[in-house]
Image: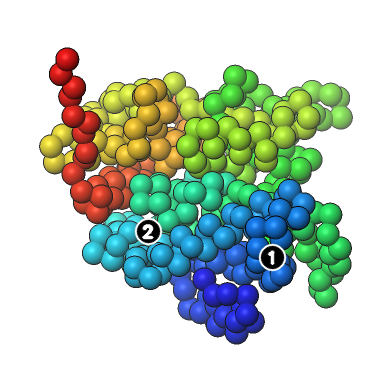
Amino acid sequence: VPSSDDSSSSSSSSSSTSSQLQPHSRFLQQVEETIQRVQQLHTDTTTIQDIHSLPPHQREAVGVTKRLSLRIASLHKNNDCPTCWLQRAHCICSQITPIDNDNPSDSDSDLGRGREWGLDLLPDNVNRIFLILHHKEIGLIVDTAKVILAAMPSTCRLIVNGIDNEMDGMDNDDDDDGSDNQYQLQPSMGELREALEQKERRCIVLFPTEDAKTFEELSETATSIGIGTDTDGEEMHGSGDETFDVVVIDGTWSQARKMHSRYIPLVENGGPARVCLSEESLRILGGGDDDDGGSNDEAEAGGESLSSPPSSSGRQLRRHPIKWREVSTLEATRLLLRDMNVSMSMQNNKNWNKMKVSPEGKACHDLLSEYQRIADTAARKQLGAIRTKPVAFI
């Protein structure tokens, strides 16, 4: 990451490079541009005393960007891939096809050729996916959020925690174009705030709170998602063409709980509905039969065997004493998208089997499962053999 002294030249260079990058390659560059903006605002913050003299939110932003700067500099120094954050020898980018292409080629039905142009497999009721990422996850080999960003570059918005309210309380005038620059450090943060504050509540947060409902339950109760009532005060139910902004939080469980409390307003305070996975998705996660009632895709493509990594069934490579907390962010997102596809199919076809996903939904489900397997296999190769603790004999 360039220093603040040459930020002006690097800014023009990065802007010219940005137009040449593929969408999924821009997320790390977005983080670097945020770092540069913070550095430009705090060019005089060079000592510990200077940092401690800042207001808390500014002090946090400076600290976060300093740590991110070192991590990203190491990534570039080692010539690691800026998209999958793996060593070039283990890079998986050529195997990750975007699945949110709005204008796919006619040849996209062939997954082999589809890798060249991208696919259009996301449920139509998905508008945007806001991925709130803990800053310590940036550059992490085993993180799965990078796969979500690579697979859905047009749909995803990346928000790095800790750099959210940097401009609050500062003297910021509007930009020349009249737009509010309060969130200029992270434009995606402005999008997230708008999504959370919209009056027509079409924003949902994937987080297992006690009051969380499945997507089907939210769809059946229109007022739970703010669709509203008609002139007679009767509930207005969705017509099947409603679109939703989805908020996903990525980090350890301790980090995720803090980010959820920090960024997401409570439902009773007008915040968005919390959504959890359906019983069918939990059954799939637990290794049940697949959607067609045949063999279990999860067990075949990612079962724990000698030939595949132990996390390919949806568990992350990082271990946790509570097994369900080993579920990766990618896996939870994949299953929520499945639930949204099933719900949409049911609304469009009342005779649709609530246990069955559409062909496009199944292709999305299976492809994301394959992406997790690919990412986990590459990460395992780079990290080496699993280290086990020696058994103590008493």
Label 2 secondary element: loop
- Which residue is at a point 55% across and 36% down the rendered structure image? 256
On screen, residue 27 above or below 217: below
Type of amino acid under label 1:
Thr
Badge 1: how crowded within 10 Å, few (<14), some, or many (20+)?
some
On screen, residue 192 above or below 91: above
Residue matched to label 2: 84
- Which residue is at a point 62% across and 20% down the rendered structure image? 211
Residue 266 is left or right of residue 303, and the answer is right
- Residue 219 in sight in this render: no
- Which residue is at a point 33% across and 24% down the rendered structure image? 286
> CA separation, marks 1 and 2?
32 Å
Residue 53 is left or right of residue 295, and the answer is right
Which mark is on residue 45?
A: 1
Closest to the observer: 80 or 377? 80
Identify the image quadrant of the C terminus: top left
- View extreme (left): residue: 306
Answer yes or no: do the residues labelled 1 and 2 have beta carbons within 8 Å? no
Residue 157 is left or right of residue 95, and the answer is right
Residue 150 is left or right of residue 218, and the answer is left
Type of amino acid under label 2:
Cys
On screen, residue 22 above or below 303: below
Tell me residue 207's x, y (percent): 56, 31
Tell me residue 229's x, y (percent): 80, 29
- Which residue is at a point 40% across and 46% down the rendered structure image? 144
Closest to the observer: 123 or 83? 83
Question: By what rule are the colours in the image chosen?
Answer: rainbow
Front: mark 1 or 2: 1
Closest to the observer: 297 or 16? 16
Which mark is on residue 291?
A: none
Label 1 secondary element: loop
Tell me residue 273's x, y (percent): 66, 31
